[in-house]
Amino acid sequence: MNTIALHAARGAVVELRGIHKTYRLGQHVVPALRGVDLAVQPGEMLALTGPSGSGKSTLLNLCGLIDAPDQGEILLRGQPVHQLNETASTLLRRDALGFVFQSFNLVPVMTVTENVDYPLFLAGVPAPERKRRVAEALERVGLGEHAKHRPDALSGGQRQRVAIARALIKRPSLVIADEPTASLDSHTADQVLDLMRECCHADGAAFVIATHDDRLTRRCDRVVRLLDGVIEETQIPQRNIA
Amino acid sequence: MKWLKFAWLNTLRNRRRSLVTLSIAALGTAAILLAGGFALYTYQGLEQSSARTTGHLIVGNPEQFTKDEDVPLQHGLDNVAALRQQLLADPAVRHVLPRVEFSGLISNGDKSTVMVAAGIDPDSEFAVKGPFLQMTAGDVLAGKSTAMVMLGEGLARSLKAKPGTSLTLLASTTEGALNAMDVTVKGVFSTGIPDIDKRLVYTDIETAQKLLVTQRVSTLGVFLRNMDDVAPAQARIAAALPKLTVQTWLDQATFYKSVKALYNRIFGALGLIIGVIVVFVVTNAMAMAIIERTREIGTLRAMGTLPGQLLRTLALEGMVLGGGGAIVGGLVALGISVFLLVVPVQMPPPPGRSTGYPLQVAIDPSMYVATLAAMVVLAMLASAWIARKTVHRPIVDALAHV
């Protein structure tokens, strides 16, 4: 890997400027992020790495608009979003962001179809269009035959593919993925990575992925390593350097 | 519709817990409806009984209702026939029954005892009121049976009287003198209230007037075609007879009013307790469900679900549990009510009475609708209340919930 300069912010899907974030643990104030600047480009697959407590989950939450910084700015598609109220940030997440979780976080009482359909339903997409898009998404992730199954009838890899289909169904600008391969065996993890990469390139969605998985970081366009709340280094995996 | 389906599916996650919650809601609803139905049946019965005893409206001189009499019929009505015709001209009026109320002594020659007597128009009285007395011996009074009396069961026993026995009535006349009259027992009856049966005597109105040496009557009982006619008929008659007072049956139904006040408090408190229990059970079930699903709620919030949308689906979940239970409870109550109509169950006599009564439960659609709606609303509000903190919890915290 080679260390490179921070990507240019111009045209970034999400941009973080001078982000500070602290947590209070009892009497102690723990700094989680200390002046982080980061920009993620459309179609980019960016990995956040670092040891536990380095701030990568905090950074991921801030990119996903499910947490707010103490200081600094967050811009999504060029618009400042760090001071939005709860409703506005919820609607922005609904329309522009997708989430993939380590433990899949599918709704167990919903079928595969209903899980994937949920973001479209939230967005108020008409039923016929939802049906078509869900069917396409499930075919794309290879789960067309499992459409009526519930998550507990699927393997871990299948569940994560459902989660990816759910994250991408509304064609988001940015997908936030928290350790998406951590619960999967290596073969399944490879399949999920292939799928994420394919979706990233095909849909133009940017992925921000928190991970400890070296196989995953090698396939990303850029790797940002955090240490003690600051970006220690930014690297481009060698295979991505022309 | 999708939210409702989601709520329904959520109730199926822990079926045993949902079944217990639903069952308690059903039992609570059934208990409220059965208790309420019983109270309502009692009210309806007492309303009919009260109106049948006095008439829907009671017409008399104002002093009759406000002052004690120095001599019998001091405040009685004159020109009864004309007054009766005037009242019968009202389209809502079915019958007008004169009544002479007095007290005195009744004697068999060896023993005298106090009596409370009513002079009635026998043919009209029994035609209008139907079988309101239980005859234990002899017959009811008939139109031309002057100098005849009907005795309460206890009074007949005290005087060792039976149909055909000669007795003497003693009472003060309207002038204050003592008068006596020989009468024959026509029948013996029971009102179902032993204390009344020890004193009550019915005789025809002519006999009563002859004993009291007067042409007056105490009051006129006005019987209407319909209970709903009471208020408008009262207004019309009061306007037509400005010198007289027109009371409704309710004004004189002290027993009805005291029973209703007592039952309202008893069954109201019972309903409140049951409602609180149901709300607590639903709340507890929802609290457990919400704690278990905290991470899922965080996930749904992260995906763009508004807190209000989550509150709605969780309230709908409460509605499914509370409303489902209420519907089942309503059906149970309906089934028991119908069963009691088909297979009568006799209750033992209440305190102070000698006869039992059929256990029946009124089926009142408005009470069913109100109870079911209350259950649904309470369950929804309880669920929303218990969910409000979780749906507003920071998403990061919710996602980290274990």
Image (cartoon, rainbow, N blue to C red):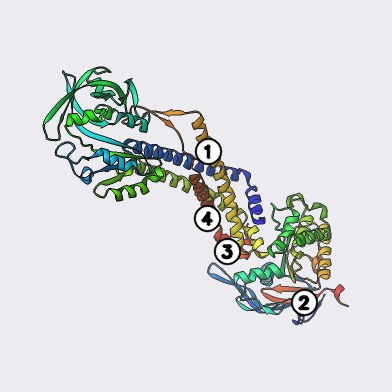
**Amino acid type, callout 4:** Leu
Asked if marks 2 and 4 touch (Cβ < 8 Å), the reply is no
Asked if marks 1 and 3 touch (Cβ < 8 Å), the reply is no
> Where residue A196 appears, x then y in whole percent?
80, 65
**Amino acid type, callout 3:** His
> Where residue B25 appears, x then y in whole percent?
53, 44
Which residue is pictured at 56% across the width and 57% down the height? B387
**Amino acid type, callout 1:** Leu
> Where residue B106 appears, x then y in whole percent?
19, 25
Query: Where residue B381 is drawn, which disc sits there?
Result: 4
- Residues indicated by labels 1 and 3 sit on the same polypeptide chain: yes
- Residues indicated by labels 3 and 4 sit on the same polypeptide chain: yes
Which residue is pictured at 65% across the width and 63% down the height? B305
Asked if marks 1 and 2 touch (Cβ < 8 Å), the reply is no
Q: Would you name the residue on which mark 1 appears?
A: B334
> From the image, which quarter does the N terminus of chain B lie in?
bottom right
Which residue is pictured at 29% across the width and 21% down the height? B187
> From the image, which quarter does the C terminus of chain B lie in?
bottom right
> Where residue B156 appears, x then y in whole percent?
25, 21
Query: Marks 4 and 1: which is nearer the front?
Result: 1
Which residue is pictured at 30% across the width and 40% down the height? B85
**Amino acid type, callout 2:** Gln
Q: Would you name the residue on which mark 3 appears?
A: B392
B264 and A140: which one is in front? B264
Mark 2 → mark 4, Cα distance in angstroms: 46 Å
